[in-house]
């Protein structure tokens, strides 16, 4: 063994910074891309956003200046300067962009502030306020108390009964059920608020909560000496209660999905285009070109700076255009493969993999994966995530294949139409699907049923 230097030729893929950025841009949803492009416009002085109202005037001026000063510029500006760059259709005569006003965020009251405002109205005793503030600070997101009362009593040097009194005050606050120490107490507090403490529902929660959680309705029926039908009616009452009352206060505002692609039906064909009206349309700034042409004394350092920024701007515009073409190409392939879905609905979805789409459009599977990640498409049948159109295959007796999603939809339909007094077992559902020509095992039916959030047959039974 000895230490030495050797030369060896190997082939390997080098992930350049530009390639990394190109892949990030490809994976970005439209909203995120919009923010990135605006940031690039601020950082690169050679990039500017096109004002469509003056675009035609700019085109005329550029064509005249290029004819006059063609030989004066050392840089090949013809390759770089574009009069317009449409990210959607690629043409300047794209329909007029709509302007949307940005929604002003409204300051929301926090859960602790909401509870403290009620506490200040309920008592003016300074020590009770301090103990109450400590208890409110110990509530989790669901509204449950997470610390023992003894700990609070030791902290303030008071009797545990004093802390219990303050907690009882907090448990009268809105939302009903907040301040409970466990689920059972939370449900009983809500029943008390509705004046239902003398009902069978309260007796079930108070004395038979473990059996109720396991849906052992027959055991509860025997102990309370009432019918199973009555037990189920009371279970519906308990089901209307909120097991996590604190979430009603801290719940975030709904996040709306803005589709990245749009599929519309035109005659017998489906047309795919990008939903990019709010994405800045980019071009190279003409002021720097004019500066190079009209100022022969410009320094070499300035020229190098402009040329460097020029290459970055050109590369960004080309990358955005490549992203546009790639996304449309992938979506067109999905539409072609899932034509039955667009014509007839989700029941007719076909099995589809990323590899199938990648082979069809001559791209790598990882590229298709990036295109379909965190992106949505608006179709005549609703808004879907692109990943929705991909799924595993199940065999049929005819030798064809169907999508697992269509099998789930069929399982849900069978369960919705079953006799509630005699619900179908997973094996019976599998037998029905086999009669329809679908080859599926009982355990597969059970897995799909759980994914759909449907209970087993014994828990679906109605009396």
Image: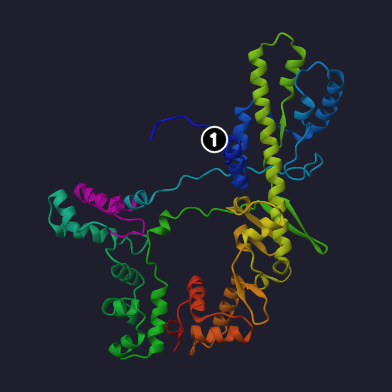
Q: Is residue 202 left or right of residue 261?
A: left
Whole-percent x, y for residue 260 in the image: 65, 51
Residue 189 visible in the current orientation: yes
Residue 193 is covered by the magenta coloring: no
Residue 124 is covered by the magenta coloring: yes
* Span of residues in magenta: 117-145
Q: Is 268 rendered above or below residue 290? A: below
Q: Is most of the magenta stretch helix, strand or loop?
A: helix
Q: Nearer the viewer, residue 170 or 346?
A: 346
Q: Nearer the viewer, residue 123 or 448?
A: 448
- Report helix, strand or loop for mark 1: loop
Q: Is residue 423 left or right of residue 62?
A: left
**Residue farthest top in this picture:** 297
Q: Label 1: which residue? A: 8
The part of the image, by quadrant, that contains residue 58 is top right
| Residue shown at 73% from the left, 16% from the top | 291
| Residue shown at 41% from the left, 74% from the top | 239
Whole-percent x, y for residue 301 in the image: 63, 14
Whole-percent x, y for residue 167 in the image: 24, 59
């Amino acid at each position: 063994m000895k230490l030495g230097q050797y030369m060896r030729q190997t082939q390997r893929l080098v992930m350049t910074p530009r390639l990394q950025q190109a892949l990030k841009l490809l994976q970005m949803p439209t909203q995120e891309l919009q923010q990135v492009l605006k940031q690039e416009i601020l950082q690169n002085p050679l990039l500017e956003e096109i004002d469509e109202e003056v675009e035609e005037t700019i085109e005329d001026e550029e064509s005249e200046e290029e004819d006059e000063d063609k030989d004066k510029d050392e840089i090949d500006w013809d390759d770089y300067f574009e009069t317009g760059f449409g990210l959607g259709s690629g043409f300047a005569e794209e329909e007029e962009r709509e302007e949307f006003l940005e929604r002003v965020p409204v300051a929301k009251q926090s859960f602790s502030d909401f509870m403290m405002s009620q506490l200040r109205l309920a008592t003016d005793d300074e020590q009770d306020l301090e103990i109450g503030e400590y208890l409110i600070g110990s509530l989790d997101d669901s509204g449950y108390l997470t610390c023992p009362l003894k700990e609070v009593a030791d902290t303030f040097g008071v009797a545990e009964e004093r802390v219990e009194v303050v907690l009882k005050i907090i448990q009268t606050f809105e939302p009903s059920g907040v301040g409970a120490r466990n689920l059972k107490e939370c449900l009983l507090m809500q029943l008390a608020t509705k004046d239902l403490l003398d009902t069978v529902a309260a007796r079930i929660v108070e004395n038979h909560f473990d059996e109720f959680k396991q849906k052992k309705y027959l055991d509860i029926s025997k102990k309370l000496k009432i019918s199973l039908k009555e037990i189920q009616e009371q279970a519906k009452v308990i089901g209307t209660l909120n097991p996590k009352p604190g979430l009603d206060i801290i719940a975030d505002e709904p996040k709306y999905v803005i589709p990245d692609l749009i599929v519309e039906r035109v005659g017998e064909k489906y047309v795919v285009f990008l939903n990019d009206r709010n994405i800045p349309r980019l071009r190279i700034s003409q002021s720097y070109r004019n500066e190079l042409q009209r100022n022969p004394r410009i320094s070499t350092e300035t020229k190098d700076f402009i040329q460097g920024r020029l290459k970055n701007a050109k590369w960004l515009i080309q990358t955005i255009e490549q992203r546009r073409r790639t996304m449309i190409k992938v979506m067109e392939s999905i539409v072609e493969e899932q034509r039955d879905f667009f014509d007839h609905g989700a029941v007719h979805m076909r099995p589809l993999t990323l590899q199938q789409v990648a082979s069809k459009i001559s791209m790598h599977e990882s590229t298709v994966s990036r295109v379909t990640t965190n992106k949505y498409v608006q179709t005549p049948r609703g808004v879907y995530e692109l990943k929705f159109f991909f799924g595993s295959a199940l065999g049929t007796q005819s030798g064809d294949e169907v999508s697992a999603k269509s099998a789930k939809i069929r399982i849900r339909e069978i369960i919705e139409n079953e006799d509630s007094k005699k619900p179908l077992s997973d094996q019976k559902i599998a037998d029905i699907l086999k009669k329809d020509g679908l080859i599926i095992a009982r355990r597969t039916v059970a897995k799909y049923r759980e994914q759909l959030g449907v209970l087993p047959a014994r828990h679906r039974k109605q009396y």
